[in-house]
Amino acid sequence: MPNDIRTIDRTFGALADPTRRAVVQALCKGPATVSELAVPFAMALPSFTQHLGVLEGAGLIVSRREGRTRICSLNPESLHSAEAWLARHRCAWEARMDRFEAHLERSDEEPRNE
């Protein structure tokens, strides 16, 4: 379980940044070179590659070399642990919201002493 928690922490930590989320979204369309991925961002290439390093460290992307070009691909399996974590907690969140809604409805129905 502690290993799962570290994986989830790395996944959510990597996805906390809008640049990295945009890279993941771009890679949903298919593999791309580092240069292609960097085009929409107004930052130096070394700064951009640091973002790729975080994504790769979290296991969200994989990269390979083809000659002098580095090609990145999405690693969809890496999202499974985060997806499972969200699913486990979704039931609890929905139950809390249902109880809150019921409480609000009861509060509206109660007569007020004015």
Image: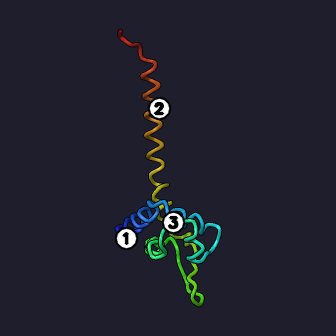
Q: Earlier in the sequence, mark 1 or mark 3?
A: 1
User: Measured from the top left, where is residue 9 in percent x and y?
Assistant: 39, 64
Separation of residues labelled 1 and 3 (CA atoms): 35 Å
Q: Position of residue 90 (x, y in %)?
A: 48, 49
Crowding around mark 2 (Cα neighbors within 10 Å: few <14, some 14 to 19, many 20+) is few
- Judging by the rendered image, the residue that carries numbered circle 2 is 101
- Please, what secondary structure does the residue beneath circle 1 have? helix
Image height check: is 65 above or below 26? Answer: below
> Mark 1 against mark 3, which lies toward the viewer?
3
Give how far across and how far down residue 98 sits, in percent.
Answer: 47, 36
Tag shown at residue 26: none
Q: Which residue is nearer to you in this view: 84 or 14?
A: 14
**Amino acid type indicated by mark 3:** Ala
Please state which of the two labelled residues, at mark 3 or mark 2, is closer to the viewer.
Answer: 3
Which comes before the other along the chain, label 2 or label 1?
A: 1
Residue at figure coordinates x 44%, y 23% from the top left: 106
Residue assigned mark 1: 3
Coordinates of residue 18 in the picture (x, y in percent): 48, 60
Label 1: how many Cα within 10 Å (few below 14, some 14–19, many 20+): few
Residue 64 appears in view = yes
Q: Quadrant of residue 104?
A: top left
Q: Is residue 55 visible?
A: no
Judging from the image, what secondary structure is the residue with disc 3 in?
loop
The residue type indicated by label 1 comes to Asn
| Displayed quadrant of residue 40 | bottom right
Residues at badges 3 and 2 in contact (C-beta under 8 Å)? no
Give the residue pinned by disc 3.
Answer: 42
Measuring 59% from the left and 69% from the top, which residue is drawn there? 27
